[in-house]
Amino acid sequence: MEKVVEDLGECIKDAKARLGYQKVVLAGWSGGGSLSMFYQQQAQHATVTSSPSGDGPDLTRLDLPAADGIMLLAAHISRHGTLTEWLDASILDETDPTKRDPELDLYHPDNPNQPPYSQEFLARYRQAQIDRNRRITAWVKDKLAELAARGRPDDEFCFVVHGTMADPRWLDPTVDPNERTRAPAIWVIREW
């Protein structure tokens, strides 16, 4: 995924040079929306010199042509933003997903926080999701550094992220309200 911005730049160049298009409009659907916006920002003013893992590409060294326009079609904020908003904030230990904060467990019937959620609960829940994301990220970076220190940076190491279907919006339609109703039961079935 780190090279997708470079690939997109090459597609724009090809559309103009080989296919003869005078103008190119990027159409970003779903995660392509945030990608298109990121691409355009970097094409106009490149600032990214490496990926989060520390390797390439250095976007400041690439010739990224700006698009002539952008369409956003059912776009979401980004992969990292969406996946963070879906993380189960109640999980306290990645090696044992049964260790949970019961007040953050959206699907536990004894959780005192039930829809419609208070703003205080939502703020606490969202912060706990960010904190969990950062713990996972720190673990991954530590594991990558450990593998590199052993002289085996390309080794694979499996890591399962449990609890990835826990966005309060699915249970409480008053969060980011629109015409939707509460999520279907398939999202919330759980036996205790």
Image (tube, helix red, strand yellow):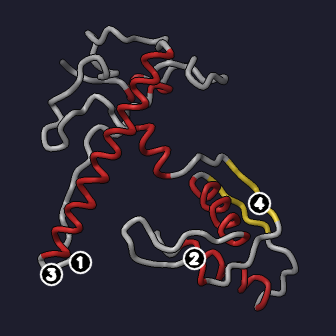
The Cα atoms of the two marked residues, 1 and 2, are separated by 23 Å
Q: Residue at x 28, y 46 (%)?
A: 135
Q: Residue at x 13, y 38 (%)?
A: 96
Residue type at mark 2 is Leu
Residue for badge 2: 59
Front residue of 46 and 116: 46
Query: Nearer the viewer's eye, disc 2 or disc 4?
Result: 2
Where residue 125 appears, as percent x and y from the top left, is: 39, 26
Looking at the rendering, which quadrant does residue 106 occupy?
top left
Which label sits on residue 70?
4
Badge nearest the viewer, 4 or 3:
3
User: As shown in the figure, which amino acid type bears the numbered disc 1?
Assistant: Asp
Instruction: Looking at the image, tell me whether mark 2 or mark 4 is earlier in sequence order.
Output: 2
For the residues labelled 4 and 3, the Cα–Cα distance comes to: 43 Å
Q: Amino acid at mark 3?
A: Gly
Could you tell me which secondary element the residue under label 4 belongs to? Answer: strand
Residue 51 x %, y %: 45, 69
Do residues under tags 1 and 2 come within 8 Å of each other at their CB atoms?
A: no
Residue depicted at x 76% and y 60%:
70
Q: Gap in Å between the C-alphas at discs 4 and 1?
A: 37 Å
Nearer the N terminus, badge 4 or badge 1? Answer: 4
Dot 4 amino acid type: Ile
Tell me the quadrant of the picture where the C terminus can be found: top left
Residue behind mark 3: 151
Residue 40: give its label.
Answer: none
Residue farthest toward the bottom in the current orientation of the protein: 18
Sequence-first disc among 4 and 3: 4
Would residue 41 appear left or right of 183 to someone viewing this image?
A: right
**Mark 3 burial class by Cα count in 10 Å: few <14, some 14-19, many 20+:** few
Q: Position of residue 19 (x, y in %)?
A: 78, 87
Judging by the rendered image, the residue that carries numbered circle 1 is 154
Q: Secondary structure at mark 1?
A: loop
